């Protein structure tokens, strides 16, 4: 990837990085707004050739408890945004959690409680008003990885939250998403508003037994067999309950051709038929560091190449967490090498097939 620039008026939001566990997911020793993330980090990201950062936000810190905003808690986001602008990066304000919409706990009352929806809409109104004068460097993401019981329940919620934002931000780009953790598989039930300034963000962590193998927070515990990419999914019946969807992957050959490309082809076909002018952004994807370095590199290369080939923007997960592109030695990881490989492969393909 080419080095980043310090000034630009064209915010493309094509190649990005998630700044995880900084202003959201602050459990354990992960302190909110800890000083591990500084301008030097933003500069490093820009120097790798990325054009935007996605900053997950936990609104419990931003609400003051009386219907207003906790300005002190928002200062770190503003500071990071200034750094980003200085180094030519766009910023996505990702509302990673919302009251009644928590992908970790599968809390989904936001999709069935009209009063709660109005409270959340009021919160978004405050955020939108606060940033109404911000330039196109800033984009909003309505909510992250919703888990409504029924896919169709998501549509009116997003429409209401978008209306709240449009009261003060009529032209700002706002990302909507799909149900069941922003899945490719639920796009068919989306009913997108007639709005020229919306975009669609989706997440891709398939095949999950590879990307999240040996993780404490899933059913794929550290005792499971190693899964490589490319490779074959082992029998996981001793780890998973009978009937679990991941068991259907047992014995499958996983690689770019079988596990990534068909999913992206299907998404591209859906977009061409249903929303040909819609900007699509793969807002999260990645493989946890419990996979082998070679497999991690192969996976990032495959997803980036597929995204670039279809013209989808993307933001990899994550900067310096368990999926990191920058190691503790401050050097690029194999994930970063995979990203570069994927970009180069896409460029070569476009040269051969212009």
Image: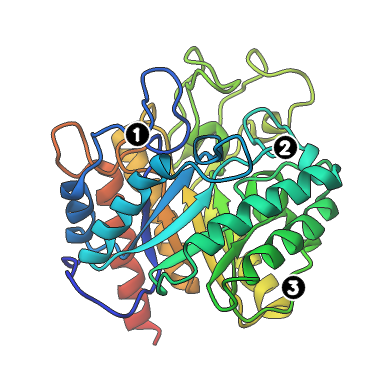
The mark that comes first in sequence, 3 or 1, is 3
In the rendered image, the quadrant that contains the C terminus is bottom left
Residue at disc 3, secondary structure: loop
Badge 1: how crowded within 10 Å, few (<14), some, or many (20+)?
Answer: some
Q: Is residue 297 above or below residue 61?
A: below
Query: In the image, what residue occupies the spot 63% across and 45% down?
Result: 145
Q: Position of residue 96 (x, y in %)?
A: 55, 43
Q: Which mark is residue 127?
A: none
Residue at disc 2, secondary structure: loop
Q: Which residue is mark 3?
A: 193
Along the line of sight, the residue nearer the viewer: 236 or 195: 195
Query: Mark 2 or mark 1: which is in front?
Result: 2
Q: Position of residue 52 (x, y in %)?
A: 35, 62
Query: Mark 3 or mark 1: which is in front?
Result: 3
Q: Which residue is mark 2?
A: 100
Query: Mark 2 or mark 3: which is in front?
Result: 2
Q: Which residue is mark 1?
A: 321
Find residue 278 and report its image quarter: bottom right
Camera sees residue 1: no
Along the line of sight, the residue nearer the viewer: 28 or 235: 28
Q: Is residue 137 above or below residue 339?
A: below
Q: Position of residue 138 (x, y in %)?
A: 42, 66
Query: In the image, what residue occupies the spot 30% across and 45% down?
Result: 335
């Amino acid at each position: 990837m080419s080095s980043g620039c310090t000034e630009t008026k064209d915010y493309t939001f094509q190649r990005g990085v998630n700044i995880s566990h900084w202003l959201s997911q602050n459990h354990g020793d992960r302190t909110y707004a800890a000083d591990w993330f500084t301008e030097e980090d933003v500069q490093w990201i820009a120097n790798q050739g990325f054009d935007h950062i996605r900053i997950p936000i936990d609104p419990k810190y931003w609400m003051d408890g009386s219907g207003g905003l906790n300005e002190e808690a928002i200062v770190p986001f503003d500071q990071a945004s200034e750094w980003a602008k200085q180094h030519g990066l766009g910023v996505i304000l990702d509302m990673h959690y919302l009251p009644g919409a928590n992908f970790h706990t599968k809390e989904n009352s936001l999709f069935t409680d009209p009063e709660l929806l109005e409270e959340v809409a009021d919160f978004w109104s405050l955020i939108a008003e606060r940033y109404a004068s911000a330039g196109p460097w800033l984009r909003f993401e309505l909510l992250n990885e919703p888990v409504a019981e029924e896919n169709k329940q998501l549509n009116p919620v997003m429409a209401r939250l978008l209306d709240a934002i449009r009261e003060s931000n009529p032209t700002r780009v706002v990302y909507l998403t799909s149900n069941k953790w922003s899945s490719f598989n639920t796009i068919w039930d989306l009913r997108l508003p007639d709005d020229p300034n919306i975009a669609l963000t989706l997440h891709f962590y398939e095949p999950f037994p590879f990307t999240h193998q040996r993780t404490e927070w899933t059913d794929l515990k550290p005792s499971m067999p190693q899964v490589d990419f490319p490779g074959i999914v082992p029998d996981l019946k001793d780890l998973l309950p009978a009937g679990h969807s991941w068991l259907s992957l047992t014995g499958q050959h996983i690689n770019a051709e079988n596990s990534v490309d068909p999913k992206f082809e299907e998404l591209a076909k859906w977009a061409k038929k249903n929303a040909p002018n819609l900007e699509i952004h793969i807002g999260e994807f990645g493989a946890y560091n419990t996979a082998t370095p070679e497999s991690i590199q192969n996976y990032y290369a495959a997803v980036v190449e597929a995204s670039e080939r279809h013209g989808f923007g993307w933001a990899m997960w994550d900067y310096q967490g368990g999926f990191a592109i920058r190691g503790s030695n401050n050097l690029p990881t194999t994930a970063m090498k995979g990203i570069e490989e994927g970009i180069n492969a896409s460029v070569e393909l476009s040269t051969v097939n212009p």
